[in-house]
């Protein structure tokens, strides 16, 4: 039945916010990835039970990032009400890994929308935060002249995250031996190769005595470098032996 001769116009307002209907969008690339120490941005859009955008502010959202496999590693996010039904979210994870983005409504219950994951990679390598490991650096083992001694270098970013692309660091790594006053041992050698998330370095010293072992990435010394080490003489080599002037004395009973 038609009432009157003209159509009636009415305004349908969105209903109350329903947390489970809210949508979450990442302000990142399609890979949902960032690097440690860089801000990750998100946008929450409040909606009613029918999926209509609320179009007004006032909702209380709580957002945090939880690192997968490390339940205690939780990164809280800052939420800003834009006043139009959208909320800007910023989080800054400092450890590499995969994080699940968890959104909770004003009632404290988590939004059960499809899970959103954020992959965080290590930032560029920082020499001063990288580490060198090995018994020869801890003073537990001496180097032996002419024999290879093993140490490991772990490239890390400025926040201490081990770097994933270790092979890229090989060309920037420098390892050398000097004496205590800084004079280089020109006959020493160092050979490096990748081994998992480390670089394995074989150092062959030539000069016995106290020495300094310098380890640097892109010219920046790694943590603790230079390391005080000791080089013991190697196996005797007859071709390198010398005879100094000597005075001979005939022993009693000698021929």
Image (cartoon, rainbow, N blue to C red):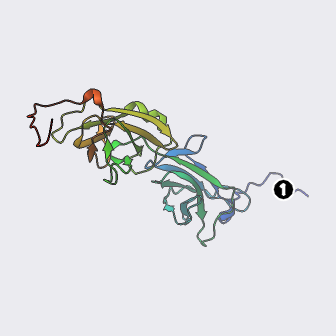
Q: Which residue is mark 1?
A: 4
Image coordinates for residue 211, horizontal then vertical, percent? 23, 42
Residue at the image point whose x is 51% and y is 62% from the top? 73
* Location of residue 225 in the rendering, given as x and y in whole percent from the top left corner: 28, 45
Residue located 9% across and 37% down the image: 249
Binning the other alpha carbons within 10 Å of mark 1 as few (below 14), some (14 to 19) or many (20 upward) gives few
Most distant residue in the bottom direction: 107
Q: Secondary structure at mark 1?
A: loop
**Is 4 drawn above or below residue 35 in the view shown?**
below
Would residue 123 be found to the left or right of residue 244 on screen? Answer: right
The residue lying at 24 percent from left, 40 percent from top is 208
Image spot of residue 111 (x, y percent) = 65, 63
Where 109 falls versus 119 (above or below)? below
Residue 108: image quadrant is bottom right
Q: Nearer the viewer, residue 12 or 14?
A: 14
- Residue under the image location 34 percent in, 51 percent down: 141
- What quarter of the picture does the C terminus occupy? top left
């Amino acid at each position: 039945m038609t009432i009157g001769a003209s159509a009636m116009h009415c305004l349908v307002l969105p209903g109350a916010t329903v947390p489970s209907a809210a949508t979450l969008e990442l302000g990142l690339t399609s890979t949902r990835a960032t690097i440690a120490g860089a801000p990750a941005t998100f946008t929450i859009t409040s909606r009613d039970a029918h999926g209509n955008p609320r179009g007004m502010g006032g909702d209380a959202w709580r957002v945090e990032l939880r690192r997968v496999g490390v339940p205690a590693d939780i990164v809280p996010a800052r939420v800003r009400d834009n006043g139009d039904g959208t909320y800007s979210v910023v989080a800054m994870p400092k450890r590499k890994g995969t994080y699940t983005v968890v959104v909770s409504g004003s009632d404290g219950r988590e939004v059960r929308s499809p899970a959103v994951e954020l992959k965080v990679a290590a930032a560029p390598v920082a020499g001063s935060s990288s580490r060198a490991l090995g018994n020869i650096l801890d003073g537990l083992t001496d180097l032996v002249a002419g024999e290879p001694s093993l140490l490991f270098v772990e490239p890390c970013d400025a926040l201490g995250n081990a770097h994933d692309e270790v092979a890229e660091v090989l060309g920037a790594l420098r390892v050398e031996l000097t004496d205590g006053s800084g004079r280089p041992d020109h006959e020493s050698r160092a050979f490096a190769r990748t081994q998992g998330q480390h670089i394995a370095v074989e150092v062959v010293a030539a000069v016995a005595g106290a020495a300094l072992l310098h380890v640097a990435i892109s010219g920046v010394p790694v943590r603790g470098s230079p390391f005080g080490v000791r080089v013991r003489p190697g196996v005797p080599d007859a071709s390198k032996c010398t005879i100094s002037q000597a005075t001979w004395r005939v022993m009693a009973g000698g021929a």
